[in-house]
Amino acid sequence: MTVRPHAFRTNGAPLAALLILTGYAGAQTASLTTLYEFKGPPDGANPSSGLVTDGAALYGTTVVGGIINTSEDQGRNGCGTVFALTPPAAPDGPWTEQILHSFAGGADGCGPANGVVIGSGGVLYGTTSDGLIGGTAFSLTPPTTPAGPWTETVLYTFNGGCQSLHLIDCPPGGSFGAGPPYGLVIGKGGALFGASFYGGAYCESAFGEAGCGAVFWLTPPLSPGGPWTEGFCSIGGGALDGPDSGLALGGSGVLYGSTAYGGKYCCGALFALAPPASPGATWTQTLIHSFGNPNIREDGQTPGADVVIDSSGVIYGITGSGGLGAGEVYSLTPPVSPGGDWTYAILYFPPSTPHGSGPSQLTLGPDGVLYSAVRQGGASMQGTVFSLTPPASPGSAWTETTLYIFTGGSDPFPNGGLLIGPGGLLFGTTAGAYPTPPNVGTVFVLEP
């Protein structure tokens, strides 16, 4: 299958036009084309997240690889990269990869495991999970001249040792040097929001005296070159413990996320954070669903992937365990009146075979079709991609279609969310099988 340049370039059309999906369902399969194979240092290696696009290129991160300059780099096979992948100028030509930044460890951070988001002016934002203290938030600004270098700026360094000192109201950097492990979303005014598993105000968590986690935000400076300002909201212990995914931004600036532990039944929960009515006031935290309910047969547990929200406010997510053993795909419908209960529904139980365990986050397409890549599963247990099509009438079963089964070679273990392109193209990454070449990850496209 040839991915033609015009299938990706949109002649300046807005990003929304690029992401229009031609809905399809039924027993169809997709054909896979590998767009790029990572080579390891000084190239990237082992991408562990999905892709984003500005309509002209694909952008992503690799958790290791890049230029090795220090003993820290050497010890982990490189501190990772941010890369761009540009389509060919002519049919059948190769895609062009460019390393936009190679992380150096230390104050620069290490291990950008959660991809990037695109802000105003094409600026990329992301986090590293390790570094001098507890990880960083960074930006990458496009060059001012064609083919010029991108400019990386460390926006904020998270505190990684505060909780181990038993301090009260620590910044949300985490315990034992672990920084913000999840990706960012962009809110009003260009503010960046994220979640950390540890940190926040001191509390007794499932992991002892390590903090129960926090939602943090970084506010842009008032004048160019000024410092970004951090704020955070502690995730309360007991009822909620350990945010284990990125955040989703809903209507009115409400943030939605999940925790690995806590809730009413011990097995994780979904929460909402509503912004204050006036600047500086307290955000309002609401527990909207607890997993592992003994009164729900084969309920899911540990909702460890980002949720997605449709135009009517319905939340869709996926759990990593529970269900029939390999988790479940679920929906949560908003209450009819403010303060009411959300309506929880189990849409699908991915069986251990052929899908395997550990589904990645869902991607929501037009007509409500859901897509997910699964790291393990299929005949070779090296991954699958499947879709779920909503029923024609409410209450009927959703239709699952296995789109692709990975069979090894240079493309094992898909991970991260899928990016929807024109004509139903699905762009994604595989992590590869080894920390050193060969098989250190790919970027692929599936054509329905």
Image: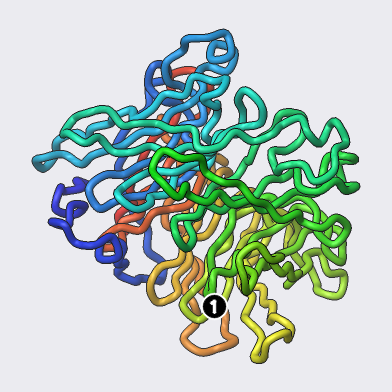
In the drawing, does residue 313 fall left or right of residue 404?
A: right
Q: Residue 328: x, y in percent? A: 66, 63
Q: Is residue 58 above or below residue 322?
A: above
* Relative depth, front residue between 40 and 25: 40
Residue 69 seen in this snapshot: yes
Image mark count: 1
In the displayed structure image, the side of residue 2 where residue 323 appears, left or right: right
On screen, 47 above or below 351?
A: above
Q: Name the residue: 71% across, 65% down.
A: 282
Question: Residue 23: which quarter of the image?
Answer: bottom left
Kindly tell me whether residue 354 is visible in this rendering. Answer: no
Residue projecting furthest to the front: 223
Q: Residue at x 45, y 66 (%)?
A: 364
Percent across and percent down for residue 276 are 64, 70
Q: Secondary structure at mark 1?
A: loop
- Find residue 68 and report its horizontal and vertical position in percent: 46, 12
Q: Residue at x 48, y 37 (%)?
A: 138
Nearer the observer, 390 or 160: 160
The three-letter amino acid code for the residue at tag 1 is: Gly
Dot 1 corresponds to which residue?
313
Write down the quadrant of residue 443 in the picture. top left
Whole-percent x and y of residue 410? Answer: 40, 30
Q: Nearer the viewer, residue 109 or 299?
A: 109
Q: Residue at x 84, y 31 (%)?
A: 164
Specify whether 164 is left or right of 16.
Answer: right
Q: Quadrant of residue 150?
A: top left
Q: Quadrant of the C terminus?
A: bottom left
Crowdedness of circle 1 by 10 Å Cα count: few (<14), some, many (20+)? some
For the residue pair 404 and 134, the one nearer the viewer reads as 134
Determine whether 288 is above or below 231 in the image: below
